[in-house]
Image (tube, rainbow, N blue to C red):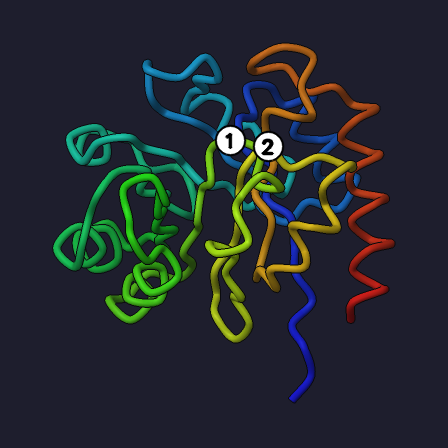
Amino acid sequence: MSRHTPFVKICGITSIEDGRVALDSGARILGVVLSTLSPRTGSQEVIRGLKDIGAEVAGVYTDLDSVRKSEMNEDYVQLHFPHGIEEITFVRDHLKKRVISVVMPQYSNDPGTEALNLLRLGADYSLIDFGSDLSGVPASRKIDLSGMKTGVAGRISAGNISYALSLNPYFLDVSSRIEKYPGKKDHGKLIELMEMFRNESELVS
């Protein structure tokens, strides 16, 4: 069986300009944070604009109430809070949207197994968000994600993308390390990361 070639999701998009650069550089999914708790808060207007330029968009939510009140212009609903089958089923069956389920290792003794369980409960993708620099994850907690539709996040940059890909993720979720400041992407860093991603992906494919 051939190995899956991973893709990149660029998250924390707050402008059409940044979204266009991400798309042109090869990103497959763009994430827009819909939470006032984040310094990267976006809007439904941004989501509509990104859809107009041909992007697949994930709306990122930190609570279920915000999901229920949303206009739902996005393709994916990213559940970035503790959840289970009820929330996944609500998004898939009631809202008719695809689901990205997030696992946070600081709240999980076995994030790999939890990510797999969320996929079994109906999530389209799961995402393990290491929060801090993922290259600092102890070897004892290193997770091989081969065969799972699970991505990784955790301050991924051109400098640590090789390590991120060594986990065999289905996709990489990138945000803070390619910014000028929270919510504004550094186009040079974004393009550099995507070039490095393509080079590293070819080496491990």
Residue type highlighted by circle 1: Ser
Contact flag, marks 2 and 1 (Cβ < 8 Å): yes
Residue type highlighted by circle 2: Arg
How crowded is the residue under tag 2: few (<14 C-alpha within 10 Å), some, or many (20+)? Answer: many
Please tell me whether residue 54 is drawn above or below residue 149 in the rendered image.
above
* Number of residue marks: 2
- Determine the image quadrant of residue 20: top right
Residue 50 in the figure: left or right of residue 67: right
Residue 143 in the figure: left or right of residue 67: right
Instruction: Residue lying at the far left in this picture: please name it.
Output: 86
How crowded is the residue under tag 1: few (<14 C-alpha within 10 Å), some, or many (20+)? Answer: few
Q: At 75% across and 51% down in the image, what residue appears?
A: 162
According to the image, label 2 marks what residue?
155
Q: Nearer the viewer, residue 128 or 99?
A: 128
Q: At 65% across and 55% down in the image, what residue appears?
A: 7
Q: At 16% across and 59% down in the image, what residue appears?
A: 85
As drawn, the label of residue 132 is: 1
Residue 94's spot in the image, x, y percent?
18, 53
**In the rendered image, which quarter contains the C terminus?**
bottom right
Residue 3's spot in the image, x, y percent?
67, 77
Q: At 42% across and 40% down in the image, what residue appears?
A: 74
Q: Nearer the viewer, residue 118 or 137?
A: 137
